[in-house]
Image (cartoon, grey):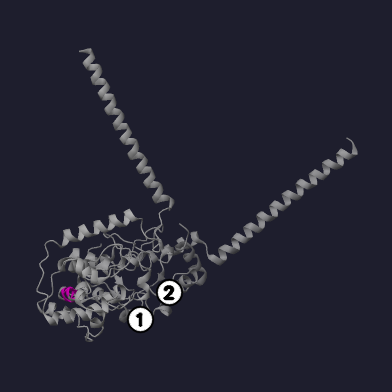
Amino acid sequence: MSRGSANGAATMNRHLQRLVGALAVLVAIGIGGVFVVTSGIYNVAANEQHLRPTFWLIQFALRRAVEHRAAGIEVPPLADERVVQRGLAHFRVHCVACHGAPGVAPQSFAFGMTPAPANLVDAAREWTPAELYWVIREGIKMTGMPAWQFHLADDDIWAVVAFMQRLPALSPAQYRSLPDVPVPAHAEAAASAAGPAPVDLPRAKQAIDHYLCLTCHRIPGLVGPHAPVGPSLEGIGARGVIAGRLPNTPANMQRLLREPHRIKPDGAMPDLGVSERDARDIAAYLATLK
Amino acid sequence: MKPRVRAGLSAAFIGVLVVVFAMALTACTDRRDEAAAKAMSGDADNGRLLLRQYGCGGCHHIEGVAGAAGRVGPPLDRFARQAYIAGVLPNTREQLVRWIVDPQGVQPGSAMPDMGVSERQARDMTAYLHRPE
């Protein structure tokens, strides 16, 4: 009996020792992590590649994330020649600058990027159409790949995917000889023919991110730089005057968002190409900030 | 007392006098410099008073100024960090003084009226709005 309890005590002791050891290791890792972050020892420079394991881990996580999110996307027919042509037009204007094309180098700024912009012939071979659509529409954080959601209509994104399906089979000479196709206008007019979409506040927050509003304004309810370049928009919904001259009505706010230079020609707020729908959504969100 | 000791003592006394005098003098010039600097860059405490007296708080929220909770124009909290004044002028002290004195000259038609603020007063207001935080 007493021997059994002595044994039990010894086992307890061992468990306790292991627990303390594990805790010590965790604390050491924590301290190490804090040191790496606060000391500035981690190099954020774009001209220094990740360590091999870091690179592998990021690639793996990226791959899994895209697969997971693209899983339910339904792919429209992509073989129509007109769709492919439309995709080519967008591809030339929006993709080649960073990614290059068969026999075509990217623009010089793309050479300084880490991670390097992917070769799209390889991407077209490696990724499914649904995954390509997802990546183009949503973008990829911390890579330089922007989200095209607010810039290209869904049909146009699919058109780019359709063209990319042809990429692996194109020789550089064939790519060069493809016809010049003008970029079709943004498909917004077609959408508004069906009546304006209802105001969508979660979408408005995405739009605020997309148009880089937080690089100049403080806007409650969002995560971002909130840089104090222009005025803070805290309480903007209750503000009497906007742009220093207009009564703060929804219509004026939308006007200011779409054409700031019309209202203040010498102002620092640039024309950002905000679409009618995006201006409506953003103005609706700003109106909630009392 | 031996004459040599006496000479030493008086030399030390004179030395102490000189040091004290010099200190008083530097303190004086320091204060004069401070006053000159205040005249140049404005008096933040007076600026806060002026911001209240001119009713700036009727349109602007200004931290530290009693009753300044207006919601007509933009809030002026942490204003020193903001990059532009009225969306058009780079936010330097000189430009802020210019804007406060003559908003209609800078941006005709702006909702910000000419308040008849003198340059000296605007300098003080600027000192408050640009106070280090």
The answer to whether A263 is drawn above or below residue A135 in the figure is below
Residue A265's tag is 1
Callout 1, which amino acid?
Pro
Q: Is residue B65 left or right of residue B15?
A: left
Q: Residue furthest top?
A: A2
Please tell me which residue lies in front, A133 or B79: A133
Corner quadrant of residue B55:
bottom left
Please tell me which residue lies in front, A194 or B71: A194
Please tell me which residue lies in front, A243 or A170: A170
**Element at label 1:** loop
**Element at label 2:** strand
The residue that appears at 76% across and 46% down in the rendered structure is B16
Whether residue B14 is visible to the viewer of this picture, yes or no, is yes
The residue that appears at 22% across and 81% down in the rendered structure is A89
Whether residue A136 is visible to the viewer of this picture, yes or no, is no
Corner quadrant of residue A221:
bottom left
Q: Main secondary structure of the magenta part?
A: helix
Callout 2, which amino acid?
Leu
**Where residue A33 sits in the image (x, y, percent)?**
37, 47
Residue wearing tag 2? B89
Residue B99's tag is none
Asked if residue A150 is among those painted magenta in the image, a careful observer would answer no
User: Badge 2: few (under 14), some or many (20 or more) residues near its Cα, within 10 Å?
Assistant: some
The answer to whether A122 is drawn above or below residue B66 in the figure is below
Q: Chain of mark 2?
A: B
**Where residue B100 sits in the image (x, y, percent)?**
44, 71
Query: Magenta segment range?
Result: A156-165
Q: Chain of mark 1?
A: A
**Where residue A227 sits in the image (x, y, percent)?**
36, 64
Q: Are marks 2 and 1 in contact (CB under 8 Å)?
A: no
Asked if residue A164 is among those painted magenta in the image, a careful observer would answer yes
Corner quadrant of residue A72:
bottom left
